[in-house]
Structures are given as structure tokens and as C-alpha cells.
Amino acid sequence: MSKTQIHKEIFIAAPLVAVWKTMGDFGGMEPWFPSAQECTVTGSGVGAVRRLVMPDGGVLEEEQTERVEGEQYTYRIVSGEVPFSDYSSRFAVKTEAAGTRVIWTAEFRPAEGAEQSAAEFVSAVYEGGLAAGKALLEAAG
């Protein structure tokens, strides 16, 4: 089965340094990411593993696989009940006009029969996170 790719981005009217400080913190998702009720990290930098507790009680563990401070990080899911496998993602920021462009991409293999629902699930999670991050950072002004 071929991989599905998701690409979401948003413009935030805040400087890159502020966006990265809030949203680029691999273990600091709670303030801006509505899909995580709790976020803890073991380790730091490449190889760090974050444990996310979802609103429904589900737990997801993700390992940071690459990090370029102030620019991007990549990660992969190492455990959790999700409708896909072989998941990798990239979270990136870049300065744009009077603010910051945030780009969040993923690539994964949907479970058989879950191609559409897996893509819709990841898209909704990313869109919700990006919108919440934008709202938080722009309100902080």
C-alpha cells in the first residue's frame, strides 16, 4: 500500500522566535495543541521521546528523529493506537513578511480500509493544532 502525504500550513502574525519558542518545543505541546491533554518528554534533542495523553485517554509516543533549532524538527510514532503505520512527520517554521509560516507535514501508510479516515484524522489534528497555536500566539501579541 502506498503512503499518504498530508501537508498543512498556516501564517501566524508573530515573529519566528516567538512561534518556535512555543510551537517548536518538542515537549511543550499542552499550551497550544488541543489533541494533547498531557505531554511529557524523556531525553532531549534527537532521540527524545514525548508521551502524549489524548482527550479520550489514548496514549501516543513519538521520537524526535532530527532537529534544526529555530527551523524544524522531525519525528516518528513509536507506539499508540492509530489507523496507520510507518508514520513520520516534519514540523517547520520560516519567516514570512510580518510573521511566521508554520508547515506541518506527514507521511504514513493507512491501515487497510482506513485510507480516507486516516488522512481525515491526521488532517483534522494538524488543522486544530495550527489554528490553536495561531490563536494563542496572536493573542499574546
Image: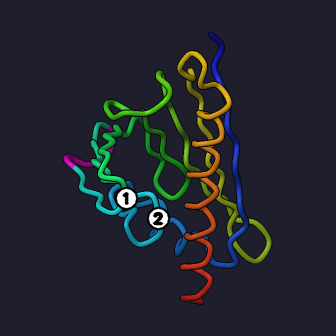
Residue 44 picture location, percent across and down: 26, 49
In the picture, measured across the screen, residue 41 lies left or right of residue 33, that is left
Amino acid type for the residue under numbered disc 1: Pro
Q: Which residue is disc 1 drawn over?
A: 55
Find the residue positioned furthest to the right.
Answer: 97
Magenta region, residue range: 42-46
Which numbered dot is residue 34?
2
Q: Is residue 112 depicted above or below 45 in this figure?
A: above
In the picture, measured across the screen, residue 9 lies left or right of residue 72, that is right
Q: Is residue 33 depicted above or below 2 in this figure?
A: below
Residue nearer the viewer, 77 or 112: 112
- Measuring 49% from the left and 64% from the top, which residue is drawn there? 23
Amino acid type for the residue under numbered disc 2: Pro
Q: In which quarter of the image is residue 139?
A: bottom right
Residue 25 picture location, percent across and down: 40, 60
Q: In which quarter of the image is the C terminus?
A: bottom right
